[in-house]
Image (cartoon, rainbow, N blue to C red):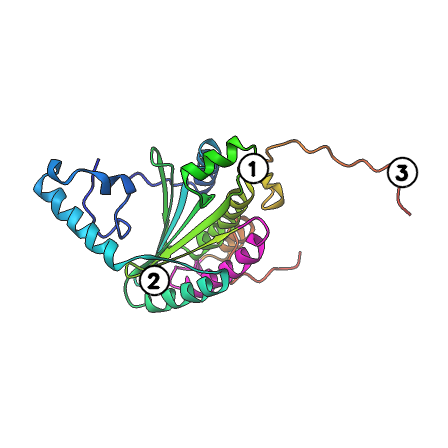
């Protein structure tokens, strides 16, 4: 199993994978306290993306990814992720232009 | 494509299709694995819980697995309905409500829960707290040798030990 080295690449590819097939994609987290290792896996049973780490820093990034997946899975793959992390939005939301300034 | 269970594979086997391989067509190694899977299945049945009991059980799983063992948490989108029910709903024109299925296992028992769109924010927060509290064995980046390089790294990454310096 080839592990992805770059965190951002892992996140982008896993979100892509999920959006391509939300029915069969799953996100697995394995934590071993005795070894101090964390392994993340995203697979749709055809393709598998893995990321492993022993850094506490990456665990923080993993929490953000958890939030992303919770949102995607609970609300649907078309959800705009910018509210979660400021990542690429699916739909271009028109910016609210206020008519005049509120005073 | 059948892989025998090893320490990296999730307990109870990889995919449900594996259990459907006709027994007579397997070779002896596969037969043994299928037997193991069947035994595993008998002992480890998945328990579906409500959100808060799930979180409590997850906490105890982490605590039990401190000396040795792993904890697996799987997230998957699911409507919790069978194919037949889904077909009925879609033909009736009703939208299928999806939930996020969360499974946790420590190779001895499996617990699961499902989270809908309404409660996922609350669950997210509690879940993150549990993870933060228990994933303490991971290494923290501490490079006290070169002060300049640490300052540069503090700007790029986030570290728990950083003290923001006033500019």
Viewer-proximal residue among A5 and B88:
B88
Viewer-proximal residue among B144 and A82:
A82
Task: Farthest residue to the right: give it.
Answer: A103
Query: Which region of the structure is painted magenta?
Result: B116-145
User: Residue B101, how many percent across, how many down?
Assistant: 45, 49
Reading the image, the residue beneath label 1 is: B95
- Residue A71 visible in image: yes
User: Residue B19, how many percent across, how many down?
Assistant: 23, 43
Quadrant where the C terminus of chain B lies? bottom right
Identify the residue at horizontal 14%, vertical 42% (top origin).
B30
| Circle number at residue A33 | 2
Badge 3 and badge 2 both on one subunit: yes
Identify the residue at horizontal 56%, vertical 37% (top origin).
B95
Badge 2 and badge 1 both on one subunit: no
B58 in relation to A1, above or below: below
Output the chain of dot 3: A
Helix, strand or loop at label 1? It is loop
Helix, strand or loop at label 2? It is loop
- Which-is-in-front pick, marks 1 and 3? 1
Q: Is B142 contained in the magenta span?
A: yes
Badge 1 and badge 3 both on one subunit: no
- Residue A35 visible in image: no
The answer to which image quadrant residue A88 occupies is: top right
Q: Is B17 contained in the magenta span?
A: no
Reading the image, the residue beneath label 3 is: A100
Viewer-proximal residue among A90 and B45:
B45
Query: Cβ–Cβ below 8 Å for labels 2 and 1?
Result: no
Output the chain of dot 1: B
The answer to which image quadrant residue B23 occupies is: top left
Identify the residue at horizontal 59%, vertical 51% (top origin).
B118
């Amino acid at each position: 199993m080839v592990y992805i080295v770059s965190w951002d690449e892992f996140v982008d590819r896993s979100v892509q994978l999920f959006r391509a097939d939300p029915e069969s994609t799953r996100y697995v987290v394995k934590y071993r306290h005795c070894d101090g290792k964390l392994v993340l896996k995203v697979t749709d049973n055809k393709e598998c993306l893995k990321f492993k780490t022993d850094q506490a820093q990456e665990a923080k990034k993993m929490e953000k990814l958890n939030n992303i997946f919770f949102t995607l899975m609970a609300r649907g793959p078309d959800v705009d992720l910018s509210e979660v992390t400021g990542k690429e939005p699916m739909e271009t939301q028109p910016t609210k232009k206020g008519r005049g300034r509120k005073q | 494509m059948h892989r025998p269970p090893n320490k990296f594979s999730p307990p109870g086997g990889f995919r449900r299709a594996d259990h459907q391989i006709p027994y007579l067509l397997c070779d002896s190694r596969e037969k043994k694995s299928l037997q193991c899977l069947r035994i595993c299945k008998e002992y480890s049945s998945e328990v579906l819980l409500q959100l808060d009991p799930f979180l409590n059980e997850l906490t105890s799983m982490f605590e039990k697995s401190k000396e040795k063992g792993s904890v697996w948490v799987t997230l998957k989108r699911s409507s919790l309905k069978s194919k037949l029910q889904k077909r009925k709903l879609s033909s009736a024109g009703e939208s299928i409500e999806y939930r996020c299925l969360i499974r946790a296992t420590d190779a001895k028992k499996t617990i699961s829960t499902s989270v809908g769109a309404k409660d996922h924010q609350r669950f997210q927060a509690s879940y993150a707290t549990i993870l933060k509290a228990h994933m303490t064995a991971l290494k923290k980046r501490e490079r006290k040798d070169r002060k300049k390089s640490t300052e540069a790294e503090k700007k790029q990454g986030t570290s728990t030990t950083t003290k923001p310096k006033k500019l």
